[in-house]
Image: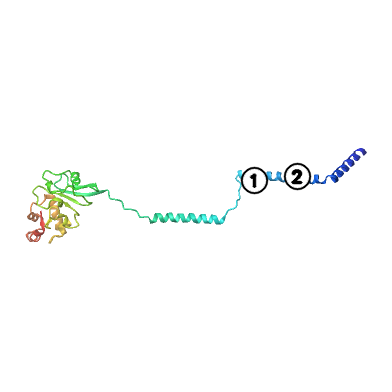
Amino acid sequence: MAQVQEERMTWARRCRLYARQRPVVLVIGAVVAALLIMALGAGVTGALGAAGAGDGGVLVTRSDTGSSERGAAEVEYDDAASDDGVSGSESKPEKQEVIVVDVAGAVGAPSLVTLQADSRVGDAIEAAGGFAADADAARVNRAAKLQDGQQVYVPRMGEAGGGGSGAVAPDVGASAQGAATADGPVDINRASESDLDALPGVGPSTARAIVEDRDANGPFSTIEDLMRVSGIGEKKFEKLKSSICV
């Protein structure tokens, strides 16, 4: 027992003697140990942080508030500019692709026909069954261009009235011009109700009666045939005869 205590005392004396002889070595060793401990702690902290992020942890980063506000303002400005661009643009009117024309007179099937917008009188006549056997085709300008709402009237052989391009009524119902000859009288075989209503002494009911009689009994051969219409006597005819033709 005494020998063990003596050995411990001998070892302690040796350590103190070593420390007095080599103090610098001990200081360096302490510093190295401290650095190792710090490095180990940093590694453990980093590993724990990575594991937390992988498990859905919250990662806090520094944001530039000023930059975010500027970015939001730029987005709003772009949206406003885009909206202004849409509202400011003017929609172009669509070009009419088809027209409707009334084909009457000496054709195979008098009717309303639908044609392409650039069609001509000849196209309208073909769409209505072509010329009838008694059609006076020489008086029809088949090359004339059509407009929506026009009337194409094909006269019969021996039928009086304007010829050539006059076989096309530009705007039936708008005025008596479309049913007039070169001298101005209204062609009672082509005139619409509104055209007839504009004649002296003719009202809406008489104009309607003229059109109904013409549709039921065919065109008038002479202007005197107009007196076959109920409501038109000799006195009224005398007022009309200078303003009408067939």
- The N terminus lies in which quarter of the figure? top right
Q: Amino acid at mark 2?
A: Val
Q: Earlier in the sequence, mark 1 or mark 2?
A: 2
Q: Position of residue 194 (x, y in %)?
A: 17, 57
User: Which of the numbered marks, if any, corresponds to residue 32?
Assistant: 2
**Left or right: 55 as drawn, with respect to 214:** right
Which of the two discs, 1 and 2, sits closer to the camera?
2
In terms of depth relative to the viewer, which is nearer, 177 or 82? 82
Q: What x and y, as percent, mark residue 178?
A: 16, 55
In the image, taking residue 195 as reference, residue 37 lies left or right, namely: right
Q: Position of residue 145 (x, y in %)?
A: 20, 49
Numbered label tally: 2
What's the residue at 92%, 38% (across, down)?
3
Counting from the top left corner in percent of width and height, residue 147 is at: 22, 51
Instruction: Determine whether 84 is above or below 2 in the image.
Output: below
Q: Secondary structure at mark 2?
A: helix
Task: In this rendered view, identify the residue nearer to me: 151 or 201.
Answer: 151
Residue beneath disc 1: 49
Quadrant hosting residue 107 = top left
